[in-house]
Image (cartoon, helix red, strand yellow):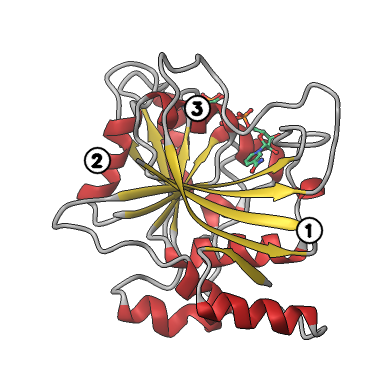
């Protein structure tokens, strides 16, 4: 792994070492240090997204993001999960990607305990229809109960099915859908303040449109897919493009692991 930005004396030394053929994978501890959440004011929350995109802007290939990913990308994916209080995910990603509950990882156990976090992040699934398979381990066998975020008008029988499976249903919208800013607040009120969303694009687009995304951890995959795959954020476009500033760029095997913060 090489740090390309910000450039420091350490970067220069690392780069020299890479040039000398001493490239090495970073430890999980080093990755966790690199991606640590900012200090939050009392009651504050921070929402980061973690997404992968091909060079030509595809956010998935054949309905999954895995073909765009790499081993290091998955290590960072796991690290970002391990740093989060809650992982917010759209229902379609759960349906298409065979989403599983987050697991407790020994490598992060001490760090999570020091931060006052439980053994694994809570998964919060965003859905209006609640048309989810509640017999999945995500709902029946998580380490910490899975949350379902929905609107006040969610179908009562599906709410009952979610609860019967062991999920907790939280209302974060007056109609059928979830209001992005309210979702953040509902989670923060429960102490889930270090928030991570893993998309998908339709959900991420709504956080962007509501100006509710603080940080984007974007993996630029050195691949081209052509075709008409979704980009990493969809839905109606914003009136004025939201500006982000680059916070860091890491590189491994041609993949760029970028981190941008909203200005
Ligand atoms: N490139 C990446 O990093 C990345 C990351 C994640 C996923 N993906 C890919 O993206 C694809 C799926 O993404 P997607 O954009 O189609 O779907 P998505 O964002 O994962 O999920 C959309 C669903 O989420 C629920 N939803 C979204 N906004 C809502 C709101 N405001 N209120 C209530 N429910 C809401 C709805 O569920 P209901 O229909 O249940 O109401 C909606 O159908 C997959 O192919 C996956 O592989 C890529």
Answer with left or right where residue 38 lies relative to residue 220: left
In the displayed structure image, the side of residue 8 where residue 12 appears, left or right: right
Q: Secondary structure at mark 2?
A: helix
Query: Which residue is denoted by mark 3 in the rendering?
Result: 205
Quadrant position of the N terminus in the picture: bottom right
- Which numbered disc, 2 or 1, marks the residue that appears first in the sequence? 2
Report the residue at 65% width, 67% height from top: 75
**Residue that badge 1 annotates:** 254
Give the residue at the far left of this rendering. Answer: 42
Q: Report whether the residue tagged 3 is closer than 8 Å to ligand 1.
A: yes
Residue appearing at x 68%, y 76% in the figure: 15
Tell me where residue 214 appears, x and y as whole percent: 37, 44
Please indicate, yes or no, whether residue 130 appears anywhere in the rendered image: no
Query: How far apart are labels 2 and 1 at the CA level?
Result: 38 Å
Give the vertical position of 124 relative to 35 (above or below). above
**Tag 2 residue:** 185
The answer to which of marks 2 and 3 sits earlier in the sequence is 2
Name the secondary structure under disc 3: helix
Q: Quadrant of residue 235?
A: top right
Instruction: Identify whether 165 is placed above or below 253.
Output: above
Count up the numbered dots: 3
Q: Is residue 114 left or right of residue 164?
A: left
Please state the quadrant of the image where ligand 1 appears. Answer: top right
Q: Nearer the viewer, residue 62 or 159?
A: 62
The percent coordinates of residue 169 (x first, y second) are: 36, 39
Tell me if 115 is positioned left or right of 57 in this view. left
């Amino acid at each position: 792994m090489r740090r390309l930005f910000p450039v420091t004396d350490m970067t220069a030394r690392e780069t020299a070492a890479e040039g000398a053929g001493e490239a090495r994978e970073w430890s999980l501890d080093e990755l966790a240090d690199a991606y640590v959440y900012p200090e939050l004011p009392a009651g504050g929350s921070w929402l980061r997204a973690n997404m992968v995109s091909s060079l030509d802007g595809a956010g998935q290939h054949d309905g999954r993001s895995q073909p765009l990913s790499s081993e290091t990308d998955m290590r960072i994916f796991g690290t970002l999960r391990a740093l989060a209080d809650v992982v917010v995910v759209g229902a379609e990603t759960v349906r298409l990607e065979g989403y599983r509950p987050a697991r407790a990882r020994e490598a992060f156990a001490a760090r999570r305990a020091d931060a006052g976090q439980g053994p694994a992040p809570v998964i919060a699934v965003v859905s209006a229809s609640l048309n989810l398979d509640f017999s999945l381990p995500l709902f029946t066998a998580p380490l910490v109960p899975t949350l379902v975020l929905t609107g006040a008008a969610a179908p009562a029988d599906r709410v009952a099915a979610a609860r019967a499976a062991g999920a907790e249903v939280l209302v974060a919208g007056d109609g059928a859908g979830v209001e992005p800013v309210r979702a953040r607040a509902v989670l923060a009120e429960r102490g889930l303040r270090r928030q991570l969303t893993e998309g998908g694009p339709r959900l991420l687009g709504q956080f962007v449109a509501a100006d509710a995304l603080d940080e984007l951890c974007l993996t630029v995959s050195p691949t081209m897919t052509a075709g008409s795959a979704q980009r990493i954020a969809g839905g109606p476009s914003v009136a004025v493009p939201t500006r982000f500033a680059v916070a860091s760029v890491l590189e491994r095997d041609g993949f760029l692991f970028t981190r941008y913060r909203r200005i």
